[in-house]
Image: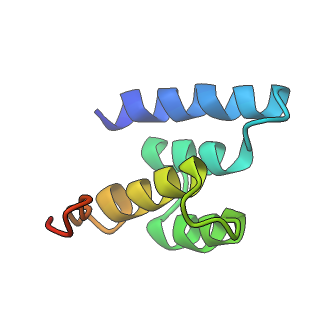
Amino acid sequence: MKYILGIVFLLIGILGIILPIIPGVPFLLISAFFFGILSKEKVVRYLKKFKNGNKNSGINRLINYVLIKYVHRKAPINANGKS
């Protein structure tokens, strides 16, 4: 499953480099984590730099979901406030 997610995030990251709408670097970092190239600490440190001020943006929600679910190995909280 990790390799499939790595490939998906790698493709999104490559699209983000080509298209100016999607940021490419955060997705390439997540992809590197899933492939085992980067450690948890480096991924958390680098991804915090790419978050923008809008907390409700889709990119920030996706980055937060990946950080919580896969890096910290916790169940994300859903809209009701329950995990």
Q: Give the residue drawn at x 47%, y 41%.
A: 35
Work out which residue is located at the far left of the displayed protein and give it.
82
Dividing the picture into quarters, in which one does residue 22 lie? top right
In front of the other: 50 or 37: 50
Q: Is residue 43 left or right of residue 77?
A: right
> Where residue 8 sits in the image (x, y, percent)?
49, 27
Q: Give the residue drawn at x 23%, y 66%.
A: 74
Q: Quadrant of the image for the N terminus?
A: top left
> Where residue 12 sits in the image (x, y, percent)?
62, 30
Whether residue 35 is situated above or below residue 57 in the rendered picture: above
In front of the other: 46 or 56: 56
Whether residue 56 is situated above or below residue 15 in the rendered picture: below
Q: Give the residue drawn at x 30%, y 58%.
A: 69
> Where residue 16 sits in the image (x, y, percent)?
74, 33
Q: Is residue 53 left or right of residue 3?
A: right
Whether residue 29 is situated above or below residue 39 in the rendered picture: above
Q: Is residue 64 left or right of residue 20?
A: left
Q: How many numbered badges does the structure rendering display?
A: 0
Dividing the picture into quarters, in which one does residue 83 lie? bottom left
Work out which residue is located at the far front of the displayed protein and give it.
80
> Where residue 31 sits in the image (x, y, percent)?
54, 42
The colouring scheme, among rainbow, by chain, secondary structure or one colour, is rainbow
